[in-house]
Image: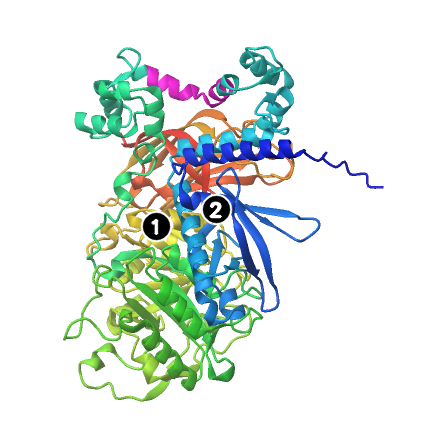
């Protein structure tokens, strides 16, 4: 006899009542999303059967539907221990129409192209490959999912917060009677990551239970919600400036913008904010801002820590290519580690859609005369060179129009090199740069603006670039030295001697134009012997040594040429080095393992967060001017020395996620660390105390001060951790941005996961001031 207690069966009338209740819940949530009565939302709520595809032999019918919260997708599972499965719309990175995943290309026939689509998840979760009954149905699923995903991501911070809290309330309502008992209230508080003692829970409950019925309903639940979401710190700020009938007049708001936010604001700017964010029509007509409107403003981009003027492309993009930091990936084909992880076209797609502008291709001879990409001398899986080039063609310019550099590590025979050149030319077409711009030998790089939509090849070349203009480009094939990563024993294996040679096909050599790989023999040698287009790759130990001992010479080298840095071969787990010292000496292509979530990748994401997240950031003037004698290690006087004092008050946190969601009673004990990364003299870190058992609305109110010498190279990073006395703290969230893109005043800071994805509704509230040092 089973010891499991079965839920009693509902009667037909109870089922109908429940269905009606769920319909109302879905309607309510649809309304909150601004999709009330929307046909695409209704399509997803009704759901339908799709074929889930895992292999050529594993293709199963499964029913999929959107749950009533309008942000969770449910699908049935035939496994006895897991009858139902769900995933959040927030977990979806993209929805791809057609056979656009490796799985669908491999396991389905081209004839079903129009019926197929894939759901691509953030992080390492496997793609969900699906097939609809016909093309029309597939299109409906894709467009409906994209609509709901876009709508949710476009919600304001406040709307996301309300949506999340209300859905947590519904989950806590165990018997689904639209009432909340004291027991359900305690369960709800744990769900939203706050632990309160029984006395306090009872106190809140009694305060809200006006009817003395022993449960909260209707207006009482609304009262409880208002008590819970009340922001005391916002009250203090608002009341200080609300000097007009208890509200902020246009003049009051302007005073706040000028005095607290330190903005160059006008009455017109204040008027626009009232028009945009005030929720009360009567107040809006009076040109007043209520507390709700004020909170709405603080939660949008004007109230964010990131300067809105730096969000689009705002820098001069007409400088030579080598005057920019370029977002760059190492061993781009790997999904995991360097020794046994899978190689995949998916890794290229993920990097390119994160605006990575330099990707690496390790090319080796493959079976049937087809070149492959994998990590040589290891058991990482192989992917066809041809498939990678197709993926690059399709995704290179989805999120940024600026040029992509393909860094080739060529270990192929001449025959397979010829095939590589054929694929690059035939697949990439006009996007591939196959000759220098102009009719005469160039003396400098073209700009990112001139190279929009173009793909450059970095690799070996048999002769100098000017041979193209001297009619001296008749060489058929020849040998070149192999001194890049493979020769540096990058994977820890015994490799070929440094001076080993490989044969190079003319066809592949000819399409290397602005990024010819050469051996580095010193800065003087490079200056005297190498053209601007001849560039070297440095493994991290060599690059760090040069940055410490010859920083100014390295900076001047990078004013004329490109430099690529790559991780040491000993990093078999795909860990990363700190990119900041490399940016400090003007290195452009600082290649990191994009597949590894780490502090170093957070810094990289922060460095390329601004300027339209286009993957290019203009270097400071003192890293581009030939007269500059800047050295990040010694800091003599010069235009780079713009001493600032950075004041920051960490005030509060909002809706921090639970770390251990499986443990019902697990509540976080959050602390905040504020870090500065830049020149050695600016590196610093300061930490708040931890708050016990409150991830919902912790308050720290702690002040820190940092002395900054070179603000143009400084990065600001926030780290929120769950404090633990017995083991290392767990990361709750993080956010990183350039110090020069920080807005002064009271600001909200979004939080990202370890992998760099936004944590909906979570954030910090801070006060910042970057002032000239006295």
Q: Secondary structure at mark 1?
A: loop
Q: Secondary structure at mark 2?
A: helix
Q: Quadrant of the C terminus?
A: top left
Would you name the residue on which mark 1 appears? 608
Main SS category, magenta section: helix
**Badge 2 or badge 1: first in the primary sequence:** 2
Closer to us: 224 or 570: 224
Would you name the residue on which mark 2 appears? 44
Residue 556 location, x and y as percent?
A: 26, 59
Q: Which residues are magenta?
A: 223-239
Mark 2: give few (<14), some (14-19) or many (20+) Cα within 10 Å: many
Closer to us: 621 or 262: 262
Determine the CA span between mark 2 and mark 1. 36 Å
Residue 308 location, x and y as percent?
A: 28, 39
Residue 611 location, x and y as percent?
A: 28, 48
- Location of residue 381 by image quarter: bottom right
Q: Which mark is residue 53?
A: none
Q: Is residue 330 shown to the viewer in this render? A: no
What's the residue at 43%, 32% (across, down)? 764
């Amino acid at each position: 006899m089973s010891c499991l207690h079965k839920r009693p069966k509902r009667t037909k009338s109870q089922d109908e009542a429940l269905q009606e209740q769920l319909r109302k819940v879905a309607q309510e949530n649809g309304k909150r999303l601004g999709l009330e009565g929307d046909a695409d939302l209704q399509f997803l709520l009704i759901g339908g059967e799709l074929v889930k595809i895992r292999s050529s032999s594993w293709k199963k019918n499964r029913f999929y539907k959107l749950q009533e919260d309008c942000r969770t997708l449910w699908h049935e599972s035939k496994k006895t221990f897991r009858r139902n499965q769900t995933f959040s719309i927030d977990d979806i990175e993209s929805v791809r129409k057609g056979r656009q995943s490796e799985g669908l290309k491999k396991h389905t026939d081209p004839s079903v192209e129009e019926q197929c689509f894939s759901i691509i998840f953030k992080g390492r979760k496997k793609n969900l490959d699906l097939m609809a009954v016909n093309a029309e149905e597939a299109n409906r699923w894709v467009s409906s999912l994209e609509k709901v995903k876009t709508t949710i991501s476009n919600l304001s911070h406040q709307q996301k917060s309300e949506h999340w809290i209300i859905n947590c309330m519904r989950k806590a309502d165990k018997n689904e009677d639209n009432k909340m008992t004291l027991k359900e209230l305690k369960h709800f508080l744990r769900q939203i990551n706050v632990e309160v003692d029984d006395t306090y829970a009872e106190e809140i409950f009694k305060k809200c239970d006006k009817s003395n019925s022993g449960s909260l309903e209707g207006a009482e639940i609304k009262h409880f919600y208002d008590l819970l979401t009340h922001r005391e710190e916002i009250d203090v700020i608002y009341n200080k400036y609300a000097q007009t009938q208890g509200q902020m007049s246009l003049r009051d708001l302007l005073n706040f913008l000028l005095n607290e936010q330190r903005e160059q604001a006008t009455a017109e700017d204040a008027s626009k904010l009232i028009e945009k964010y005030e929720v009360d029509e009567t107040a809006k007509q009076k040109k007043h801002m209520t507390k709700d409107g004020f909170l709405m403003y603080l939660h949008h981009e004007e109230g964010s820590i990131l300067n809105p003027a730096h969000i689009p492309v705002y820098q001069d993009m007409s400088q030579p290519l080598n005057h920019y930091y370029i977002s760059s990936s190492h061993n781009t084909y790997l999904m995991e580690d360097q020794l046994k992880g899978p190689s995949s076209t998916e890794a290229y797609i993920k990097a390119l859609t994160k605006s990575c502008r330099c990707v690496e291709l390790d090319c080796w001879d493959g079976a049937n005369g087809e070149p492959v990409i994998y990590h040589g001398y290891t058991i990482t899986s192989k992917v066809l060179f041809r498939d990678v080039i197709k993926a690059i063609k399709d995704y290179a310019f989805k999120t940024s129009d600026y040029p992509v550099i393909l860094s080739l590590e060529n270990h192929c025979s001449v025959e397979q090199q010829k095939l590589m050149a054929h694929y690059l030319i035939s697949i990439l077409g006009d996007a591939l740069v196959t000759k220098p711009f102009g009719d005469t030998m160039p003396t400098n790089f073209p700009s990112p603006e001139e190279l929009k939509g173009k793909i450059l090849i970095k690799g070996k070349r048999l002769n100098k670039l000017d041979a193209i203009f001297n009619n001296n480009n008749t060489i058929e094939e020849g040998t070149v030295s192999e001194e890049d990563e493979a020769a540096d024993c990058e994977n820890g294996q015994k490799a070929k001697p440094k001076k080993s040679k490989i044969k190079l096909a003319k066809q592949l050599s000819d399409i290397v134009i602005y990024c010819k790989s050469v051996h580095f023999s010193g800065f003087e040698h490079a200056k005297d012997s190498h053209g601007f287009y001849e560039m070297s790759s440095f493994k991290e130990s060599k690059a760090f040594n040069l940055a410490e001992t010859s920083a100014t010479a390295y900076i001047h080298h990078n004013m004329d040429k490109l430099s690529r840095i790559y991780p040491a071969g000993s990093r078999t787990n795909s860990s990363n080095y700190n990119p900041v010292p490399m940016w400090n000496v003007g290195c452009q292509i600082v290649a990191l393992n994009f597949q590894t979530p780490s502090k170093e990748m957070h810094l990289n994401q922060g460095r390329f967060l601004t300027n339209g997240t286009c993957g290019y950031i203009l270097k400071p003037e003192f890293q581009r001017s030939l007269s500059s004698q800047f050295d990040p290690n010694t800091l003599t006087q010069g235009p780079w020395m713009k001493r600032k004092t950075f004041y920051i008050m960490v005030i509060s946190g909002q809706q921090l996620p639970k770390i251990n969601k499986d443990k019902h009673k697990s509540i976080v004990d959050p602390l905040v660390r504020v870090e500065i990364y830049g020149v050695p003299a600016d590196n610093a870190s300061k930490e708040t105390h931890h708050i016990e058992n409150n991830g919902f609305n912790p308050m720290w109110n702690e002040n820190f001060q940092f002395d900054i010498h070179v603000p143009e190279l400084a990065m600001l990073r926030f780290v929120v951790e769950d404090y633990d006395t017995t083991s290392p703290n767990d990361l709750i969230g993080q956010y990183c941005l350039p110090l020069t893109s920080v807005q002064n005043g009271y600001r909200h800071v979004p939080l990202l996961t370890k992998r760099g994805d936004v944590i909906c509704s979570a954030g910090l509230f801070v006060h910042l001031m970057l002032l000239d040092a006295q």
